[in-house]
Amino acid sequence: MMVLDIPDITHNELTKLAIPIFNVTYLGISNTNEYSKTVNGVVWGIKGRPLVSLPVRLYDKDCPTMLNVIFKIDTGSPVSALTKETMSTLNSHCKQRNSNKDDWARVLINNRKADVLKSVGSYENVNILGTDFMKQYDVSLKIFYKSHVNPQKVKVQFNDEIAQTS
């Protein structure tokens, strides 16, 4: 039996790599209020995991703060998910928030509305950008594993017409 644990992506690892690779603070306040049509990421670690940093906020008028969230792009996951730490940090920036909803949240990812689950099990430390989100917003994904550039690159292209905002 193969174990699908992801021990190399932890909250501490994401915090360490956020500034040197993405030039952001992981789960820090995002300085962007605009959506991007193209987002660049990296192929990270010896396991070659595609990672991208996107601004995220709760889909709630009382929660206007966008945070920098690093996602593992997972074309094998039918759903997108956020870690407990990510959900908690998002909730901490709200004026009022009903905290009874622990297992899912409605959010804006790069100003696009999405329902996300809470990451659990082997993926509990990983924010996942799954195929549900990528299909809904007609995302094109290019991963350059054989690039001579270090770190190797990931390019995420949003082909939808208009970003969803509230």
Image (tube, rainbow, N blue to C red):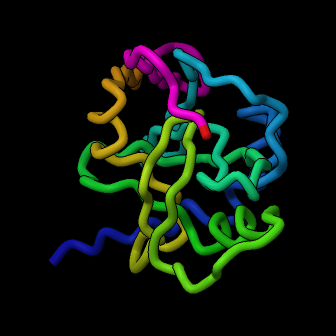
Horizontal side, residue 15 vs residue 131: left or right: right
Residue 136 or 95: which is nearer the viewer?
Answer: 95
Instruction: Determine which quarter of the picture holds residue 42.
Output: top right
Identity of the residue drawn at 56% across and 22% down:
39
Q: Main secondary structure of the magenta part?
A: loop
Residue 43 or 96: which is nearer the viewer?
Answer: 96
Instruction: Determine which quarter of the picture holds residue 73.
Output: top left
Query: Is 141 drawn above or below residue 133 in the view shown?
Result: above
Identity of the residue drawn at 60% across and 20% down:
36
Query: Is 123 drawn above or below residue 25 in the view shown?
Result: below
Residue 81 or 13: which is nearer the viewer?
Answer: 81
Residue 158 or 127: which is nearer the viewer?
Answer: 158
Residue 154 inside the magenta-drawn segment: yes
Question: Residue 153's x, y, as percent?
Answer: 52, 22
Quadrant assignment for the N terminus: bottom left
Question: Residue 133's x, y, as percent?
Answer: 36, 41
Quadrant assignment for the C terminus: top right
Horizontal side, residue 32 vs residue 4: left or right: right
The stretch in magenta equals 146-165
Question: Residue 66's x, y, as percent?
Answer: 74, 45
Question: Residue 3's x, y, as percent?
Answer: 28, 74
Identity of the residue drawn at 64% across and 79% down:
98
